[in-house]
């Protein structure tokens, strides 16, 4: 019997063609790369935010950690609210208003203390709370004290007329008027210096100038 290597015939008498094989190429999964990229972004964001928190925390003196409530911050604010429950420093804007307070000083012998400030001034904000506490304790002095404040920048972001007339070039600046007369002025953020000046012009030995 002789073996044959010819293709086997079909029922129709035709030989079957070789079967074609198809290869399907699947796309390479990219989800791991996306996840890895997102993780890197999260780390960079968190590290940058933590660095910002560290920078902010470095400037803090209350000993609090980033992300935590300030240590005794609320208690200090509550104490300030208790010592200054109402606004006791009167703000004036015009020369006419200042003139009325000076007339009262002449009539009663009261000491008038004026705080000249600017809203964007850091030292002005620093001394503001101390100035208000001095206002609350003014009743302890023998003579009455009138506490005033004036913003040297008007609503047009220009120097106010009062500041221009008084030639105020630096803030915070404090003026002390006795019997309507300017007796002392200096620029400071030291509460003790202001206290000493008030005591100087409200002591029993201090007589009002005429």
Image: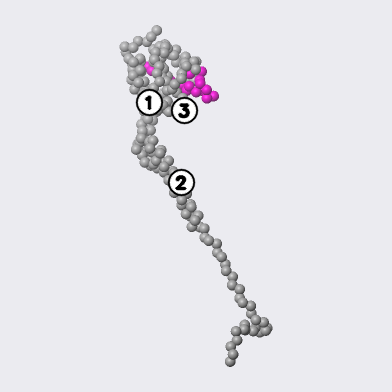
Q: Please give the residue where the numbered disc 3 appears in the rendered image.
A: 120
For the point 39% across and 40% down, which residue is it? 54
On screen, residue 161 above or below 23: above
Q: Position of residue 208 (x, y in %)?
A: 37, 10
For the point 35% across and 10% down, which residue is it? 207
On screen, residue 190 above or below 202: below
For the point 38% across and 9% down, which residue is it? 209
Q: Relative to the observer, which residue lies in front, 139 or 1?
A: 1
- As measured in the structure, the alpha-carbon distance from the residue carrying label 3 to the one carrying label 1 is 18 Å
Q: Please give the residue where the numbered disc 2 appears in the rendered image.
A: 45
Image quarter (top left, top right, bottom left or bottom right) of the C terminus: top left
Q: Is residue 2 visible?
A: yes
Within 10 Å of the Cα at label 3, are there few (<14), some (14-19), or many (20+) other Cα atoms?
A: few
* Total residue callouts: 3
The image's mark for residue 117 is: none
On screen, residue 157 above or below 104: below
For the point 49% across and 17% down, which residue is it? 164
Report if residue 145 lies within the magenta region.
yes
- Which image quarter: residue 73? top left
Q: Residue furthest right?
A: 12
Q: Are marks 3 and 1 in contact (CB under 8 Å)?
A: no
Q: Which residues are magenta?
A: 144-163
Q: Please give the residue where the numbered disc 1 appears in the rendered image.
A: 130
Q: Relative to the observer, which residue lies in front, 206 or 18?
A: 18
Image quarter (top left, top right, bottom left or bottom right) of the N terminus: bottom right
In primary-sequence order, the first of circles 3 and 2 is 2
Assign a secondary structure to mark 3. Answer: loop
Within 10 Å of the Cα at label 2, are there few (<14), some (14-19), or many (20+) other Cα atoms?
A: few
Report if residue 190 lies within the magenta region.
no
């Amino acid at each position: 019997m002789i073996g044959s290597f010819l293709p086997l015939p079909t029922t129709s008498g035709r030989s079957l063609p070789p079967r074609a094989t198809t290869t399907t190429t699947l796309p390479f999964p990219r989800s791991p790369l996306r996840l890895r990229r997102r993780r890197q972004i999260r780390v960079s964001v968190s590290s940058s935010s933590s660095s910002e928190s560290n920078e902010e925390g470095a400037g803090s003196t209350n000993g609090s950690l980033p992300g935590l409530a300030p240590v005794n911050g609320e208690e200090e604010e509550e104490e300030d609210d208790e010592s200054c429950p109402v606004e006791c420093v009167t703000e004036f804007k015009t020369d006419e208003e200042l003139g009325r307070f000076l007339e009262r000083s002449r009539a009663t012998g009261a000491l008038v203390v004026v705080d000249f400030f600017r809203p964007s001034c850091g030292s002005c904000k620093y001394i503001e709370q101390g100035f208000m506490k001095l206002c609350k304790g003014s009743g302890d002095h023998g003579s009455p004290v009138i506490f005033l404040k004036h913003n040297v920048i008007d609503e047009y972001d220009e120097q106010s007329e009062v500041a221009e007339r008084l030639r105020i070039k630096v803030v915070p600046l404090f003026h002390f008027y006795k019997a309507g007369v300017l007796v002392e002025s200096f620029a400071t953020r030291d509460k003790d210096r202001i206290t000493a000046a008030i005591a100087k012009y409200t002591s029993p030995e201090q007589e009002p100038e005429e």
